[in-house]
Image (cartoon, grey):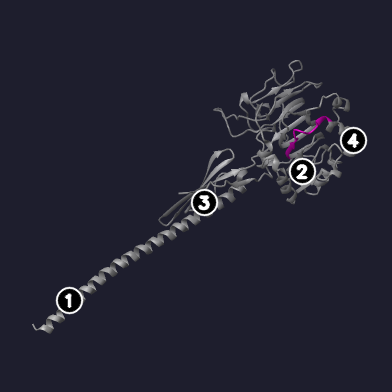
Amino acid sequence: MNKHQQSGMTTLLITSMLLIVALLFSLASYKNLFYQIKRTQNEVLARQAHWAAEGGLECGFAEYKIKKNNFTDFDECNTTKLTLKLIPVTSTEFQLESKVKFFNSLKKITKTIILGGGGVISTLETSASVELKGSQHFVPNSTEEKNNDGDFYCKTITSGGVVSFQYTSGNDDHFLTTDLSTSSHAGGPLAAVGFNCASDYRSNLFDVNHPPSYGTSSVKGKDIVENATLDIFKSIFGKDISEYSQVMTEIESDPKGIIIGKGASERTSGGWVKNCNTLIKNSYVAGKRRIWVHGSCALDGNPFGSVIENTADNAVQLVFFDGLVLLEAVSHINGLIYQYVSDSFNVRDGWIDLFNNLTLIGVTPGGFQEHNVTAGEYDKSVINVRGSVYIDGGIGIDAPNKIVNIDGSIIPSYNKGKSSKYIDSLFWQEGSWHDF
């Protein structure tokens, strides 16, 4: 083999070795490239799963908002790839979990929902004390809690003070918790009540010297809760009372909303809305169902119609802000009654102003007179409910250290659908996002 042949073979060998090395590097590079492609593909799938899970949260939030009064499951949002779960944390806080399986990628994220305004949970809920006279048949909130016999832990009155009954002159005066067991004596505004309260969650209050036809002993059951700490405005609207103007603005902007008594010229010098009864009746006839009264208001007759309805279609949200209320034989109310009275409100002056301006106000009290007021008998009385009144919905009153007076044949019934019809305060809790 000559010198040129040796040189050629050496060159060929070196070239082959270089090609082999280049091929090895190329294969390694392709392997890394394939790895990067696969990694990118997995990241894309993971992001798609994340986006799908985010979309699931929004879908679930919207579905729950629509169904919250009768919610059972996420029938509209759940799919073969998306599973939503609502986990209660408290009575007004829920964790919404969204889980997505996208090809081989599994993604779960959670976020907290706050139910800002759950509404009243008793037929009458007030931070004031309650004084009862006459004959009242209260249909309670059955609640969702039961004893071992299937009877409910009912709620009729929750008070920040005490609940008392005083006999006046009737022959069947008492306060009675009305359920299925009392159907032979009393029913609700529509018909007999279809549930039973636990025996220790039923009340029958009366003067033992003047017993009614129903019951042999006066009993204050656990359906009446006293000395409770309450913030009813926040329970209903999900905001502090200092933010009331936001709620008022929201009601005013609603096509079904109206503000009455907004201007000083619409009220007497003592704060009574002039012809409040007529203004409310005309508003109701015009289709208004969310009525905010700024000041004191006196009602009588049937400003909201003359029947208790089977549905919540015409339920009202009636707000009396920083004023006294007189309900003089108001026949029927479907919906929520809310009243707020500030600590600085002069109650005696307010009732005196009612008698001084009866013509402007348009309603005359039937159960008390001006001399009762000047004698100090009504110094703490912020609302007087008198005569025959049917209420189907709920009552909430913020008036600490004051008194709610109910005197007459009153049949209020708890109806969550009506009392919470316009309560729509549902929102995400800030900072509650969890990504798994």
Closest to the observer: 284 or 435?
435
Q: Residue at x 85, y 36 (%)?
A: 270
Instruction: Give the CA separation, mark 2 to mark 3.
Output: 40 Å
Secondary structure at numbered mark 3: loop
Secondary structure at numbered mark 2: strand
Q: Is residue 9 above or below residue 61?
A: below
Q: Residues within 10 Å of mark 2 (few under 14, many from 20)?
A: many
The x and y percentages for residue 415 are 68, 38
In which quarter of the view is residue 236 placed? top right
Q: Which residue is mark 2?
A: 292
Instruction: Give the CA separation, mark 3 to mark 4.
Output: 60 Å
Q: Earlier in the sequence, mark 2 or mark 3?
A: 3
Is residue 76 among what the camera can see?
no
Instruction: Give the CA separation, mark 4 to mark 1.
Output: 119 Å
The span picked out in magenta is: 335-348
Q: Residues within 10 Å of mark 4 (few under 14, many from 20)?
A: some
Instruction: Give the CA separation, mark 1 to mark 3.
Output: 66 Å
Q: Which residue is mark 4?
A: 358
Residues at badges 2 and 4 in contact (C-beta under 8 Å)?
A: no
Say which amino acid is labelled 3.
Asn
Q: Which residue is mark 3?
A: 78
Secondary structure at numbered mark 1: helix
Q: Residue furthest left?
A: 1
Q: Earlier in the sequence, mark 2 or mark 4?
A: 2
**Res. 13 mark:** 1
Q: Earlier in the sequence, mark 1 or mark 3?
A: 1
